[in-house]
Image (spheres, helix red, strand yellow):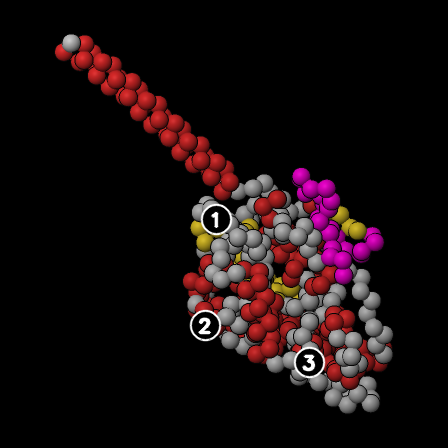
Amino acid sequence: MGCSGCRVRLNSGKVLSKVSVFLTMVLIFTYFFYCLAGLCDSAPRTLYYSQQPADGDYDVSEELRAPASHRRNRTESEDAQQVDADQQRVLGPQSDQDGRGIPVSNTFGTKRLPQAIIIGVKKGGTRALLEFLRIHPDVRAFGAEPHFFDRFYDKGLEWYRNLMPRTLDGQITMEKTPSYFVTKEAPSRVCTMNSQTKLIVVVRDPVTRAVSDYTQTLSKNPGLPSFQSLALKNSSTASGPIDTTWSAVRIGLYAKHLENWLQYFPSSRFLFVSGERLVSDPAGEMGRVQDFLGLKRVISDKHFYFNQTKGFPCLKKPEGSSRPRCLGKSKGRPHPQIPSEVLQRLRDFYRPFNHQFYQMSGQDFGWD
């Protein structure tokens, strides 16, 4: 009986041991399965897919045709409140972003402060440039405009860094906020962050830029005064002095704004991109941008086609997508009729500033 009892206990022990081993194996298998699944989920996506905005379309027209959305007498505090509200709606409180406004939970890569920033100009083509750059596998860009160096500087560099997408070694972190170019404090603040930051400025004929600026404002505020009454101090005559307090006019004084930046950065840190050539020869301009950023020339003619209906270049259909990535629905918004003598008055006004800008940038943009 004693030996029989021992054998029963021994056999029971062997069964329990096998069950324990089996359960351990199941747990180990389950652990590795979820680890592998999580790794796959955090791995970088394919070339086009990883760089696309969440909405599938980018609105180049808002940059190349349309004006800024603020009223002439809108206050800075009102603008800041609106940007803050937009930030909270898109980003959420201190949320982790992948650069497209979409929260992510993986830890693949590292969040870094931007090595390059598109600092201006508003309605010059900055959105088009950013979306074209996001084709490149070595560029990771924050999709929204963080407005850190002009509106949210008091939140600190760690807050700013947390907004940026994660990057791998060899990838460039970028952002774009066109209002930096015209913000007096921005150059010193960027320099304090990193004096080696590469700065890209997309410029456009200041007269057409001002008209685009006005056009979008008018579309949102139909009761806006006429372009002439805003651009001229004495709107009763086209020969009157230009009102440089109006932001649509003031932004176009590129030489004045660049002087502020050159106090903190040498000219070698800047690349000036032509908004007009970004439309007529996107591959050529993108070649210059890639060289400036030290990137291999990946973006080329094969990525673009010219949409005859819209009158702008579009990105060809990305892999896995049912349609090309083209201009936003607001493209083609008609400009209001503006007296030719008013436009000529503006051209005369901008001419000396344009020539000064040509000398400072080392490029003749042919706006005269």
Q: What residue lies at 52% left-to-right and 61% top-to-bottom?
A: 92
Look at 57% across and 56% down and name the residue there: 101
Circle 1: element type: loop
Give the distance between the C-alpha atoms of the residues marked 3 and 1, in whole angstroms: 41 Å
Of the 4 image quadrants, the one containing the N terminus is: top left
Which is more N-terminal, label 3 or label 2? Answer: 3
Cα gap from disc 1 to disc 2, whole angstroms: 27 Å
The residue nearer to you, when weighing 115 against 109, is 109
Q: Position of residue 295 (x, y in %)?
A: 55, 49
| 200 with respect to 94 (left or right) | right
Of all residues, the one furthest to the left in this rendering is 2
Magenta residues, dominant SS class: loop
Give the residues in magenta: 308-330
Q: Residue furthest front?
A: 1
Q: Which residue is mark 1?
A: 105
Residue 119 in view in this figure: no
Question: In the structure shown, which secondary structural element does the residue marked by tag 3 occupy?
Answer: loop
Quadrant where the C terminus is found in the figure: bottom right
Could you tell me the amino acid type at mark 1? Ser
How crowded pointer 1 is (Cα within 10 Å; few <14, some 14-19, many 20+) is rated as few
Label 2 – label 3 distance at C-alpha? 26 Å
Give the residue at mark 3: 72
| Residue under numbered circle 2 | 154
Counting residues from the start of the chain, the first of labels 1 and 2 encountered is 1
Say which amino acid is labelled 3: Arg
